[in-house]
Image (cartoon, grey):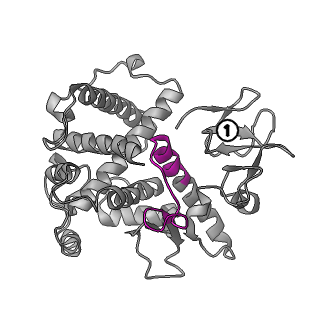
Amino acid sequence: MQRFTCDCGNVLFFGSFKCLKCGGEVGYDPIGRAMRRVRLEGDWRRCDNGLKYAVCNWLLPSKDKAMLCVACQMNRTIPDLGVKRNVSLWARMETAKHRLMYTLLSLGISLPSKAADAKNGLAFDIVSSVSNPEVTMGHLNGVITVNLEEADDTYRQINRQQLGERSRTLLGHFRHESGHYLWQRFLSELPWEDPQRLAFRERFGDEWLDYAAALGAHYERGNVNGWEQNYISAYAASHPWEDWAETWSHYLQIVDGLETCEGLGIEVKHIALPLVMLPGDAGTLPAALPQSGLADGEFLALLQRWMCVSTVLNEISNSMGEAQLYPFVISIRVAQKLRLAHHYARTWVAAA
């Protein structure tokens, strides 16, 4: 996340509605990627979900006929707002969803809405399992479904413990499901022998393995011993699609985390820790794709910065008596998968 400032010079944050120094109303402009002052008769106005429910601080041009911002327009289903508790949980959901969209748009990946582009567009169903016990989180044909109850910290942590996960966050859910969406949009219809598909198969495995059977086996047997050598999470070992989605989620976390650190003036060169020296093959692409030593080096530098910064974040968290913020290990095999995610991100910008 980049650093934002008010016209008065005070620091603002991505979710700010008001400047705490001058008292001016502010909001996020997704077109200019900046915080703007909201004035009567000005160039910007608030999203209706911000005005009515205070769950969104994104802005629209005053002349725009739409009532919702580009992020809220993608909501196909929202919770029953007649239930007071749902409004606060929905606000947390929107914070995570907006941050996901910020990162994807910052990477240059276009995000058409499902309403505007039925084939390639994206939509969100935010449904409570209290009102619909059959709700299942996931992605299907451009629609990402998230259980509203996951915004309840206690509910989410119980699920994390029961599933044996090292981390479980709302933002992680959205990042993970975006990986499924982007795979279907950009990779699923490529010819079987296309270099991009071959590269995927080399790093993640045969994506056409029986998905339902693989997940059933995963939940029946539990986590596989030694999964850390090849996967970023135990769940990633269940199926190539889940391996990809977990890897993509972590790639977005790295991109967002490094941008936040750099925006706040935290630089690796000022951190008194040795960089983890990854071998050169950790940054190479599969043989099916064109090779670039320069691009490999740039990726390795990015990954080394993250490994250094995440170590500092973990140590700070430990010093406060809290769990590690980034409880993951990036093995050589995982680094190679992240390298392909980095390649795809750049490729999809060109294809958008």
Q: Is residue 19 left or right of residue 125?
A: right
Residue 333 placement: quadrant: top left
Q: Disc 1 marks which residue?
A: 35
Residue 218 at x, y = what percent?
A: 20, 68
Q: Does residue 126 appear left or right of residue 286 in this picture?
A: right
**Rendered residue at 53%/46% (across/down):** 102
Q: Considering the whole magenta stretch, tell me its main secondary structure.
A: loop
Whether residue 324 is visible: no
- Say above or below: 173 vs 13: below
**Residue visible at 36% across and 40% down?**
346
Residue 321: percent from left, percent from top: 43, 41
Range of magenta residues: 98-123
Work out whether residue 304 can be spotted.
yes
Disc 1 is placed on an element classified as strand
Depicted 160 relative to depicted 24: above or below: below
Q: Residue at x 29, y 50 (%)?
A: 247
